[in-house]
Image (cartoon, rainbow, N blue to C red):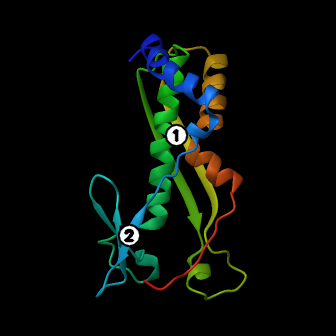
Amino acid sequence: MDATSLRAMQAPIKERYKGDPGAAMITLKAKGAIDDSNIACKVETGRALAVAGLHPATGGSGLELCSGDMLLEALVACAGVTLKAVSTALDIPLKSGHVSAEGDLDFRGTLGVAKDAPVGFAQIRLTFDVETDAPQEKLDQLLKLTERYCVVYQTIKAGPPVEIRMQRA
C-alpha cells in the first residue's frame, strides 16, 4: 500500500469522525474463561484460543502463554502496525523493519515475597530496527508520530483509570 491508497482508504473514516465524534468511540472487548483444573485462563483472541498461565518464574510449566509476554506482544504488534502506517503516510520507504520489546519484572512482588518489590513491569524498552535510506530527520519524525499514535504504547505510558469489579455469574 502507498500513501495515496492509505489516505484514500482513511479519508471517509476521518470525515465521519470529524462530523460525528461519537462514532469514533469504540469499545474493544476481551473475554476469557477460568480453567477448571489448571491455573490458567482461556482467552478468546478473535482468531484462536490463547491459554495463559503462570510464568515459570512463579511455578508455571511454560506451556501456557505468560500474560506479561502477551502485553509486550500487544505493544510490539501495535507499534509495528503504527510505524508501518506512519511510514506509508509520510512516504518513508522501509526496506525492512523489526520491533522488539523487553520488560523487567521482579517476581518477588507478584509472589508476595517482598512487600517493597513492585508488582508489574518496572521498566519497558521498545526498540525499532529499520533499514532505510531516509534521512535522520525523517526517522525522528517517524518515531515521534509512531509514539504519538500507538494505542498500546500511549495506554501503557498514560496509565488510564482501570475499573475492577467482581460479580456472581
Query: Which residue appears at 49% of the width and 27% of the height?
Result: 85
Question: Percent from the top left, x then y, of residue 18?
Answer: 63, 26
Quadrant of the rendered image containing residue 94 = top left
- Between label 2 and label 1, give the one nearer the viewer: 2
Quadrant of the rendered image containing residue 149 = top right
- Horizontal relation, residue 159 to residue 26: left or right: right
Q: Nearer the viewer, residue 150 or 108?
A: 150
Query: In this rendering, does residue 132 appear at all?
Result: no
Which residue corresponds to mark 1?
79
Quadrant position of the C terminus in the picture: bottom left
Query: Which residue appears at 53% of the width and 54% of the height?
Result: 102
Question: Percent from the top left, x then y, of residue 2?
Answer: 42, 14
Query: Which residue appears at 42% of the width and 14% of the height?
Result: 5
Secondary element type, mark 2: strand
- Horizontal relation, residue 116 to residue 155: left or right: right
Sequence order check: which comes first, mark 2 or mark 1? 2
Mark pair 2, 1: CA separation: 24 Å
Secondary element type, mark 1: helix
- Horizontal relation, residue 24 to residue 160: left or right: left
Up the image or down, 137 lies above or below 101; here it is above
Up the image or down, 42 lies above or below 59; here it is above
> Amino acid under label 2?
Gly
Query: In this rendering, does residue 14 appear at all?
Result: yes
User: Are there few (<14), some (14-19), or many (20+) residues within 10 Å of tag 2?
Assistant: some
Which residue corresponds to mark 2?
32
Question: Percent from the top left, x then y, of residue 84?
Answer: 47, 28
User: Are there few (<14), some (14-19), or many (20+) residues within 10 Å of tag 1?
Assistant: many
Q: Nearer the viewer, residue 165 or 68?
A: 165
Query: Which residue appears at 52% of the width and 40% of the height?
Result: 79
Quadrant position of the N terminus in the picture: top left
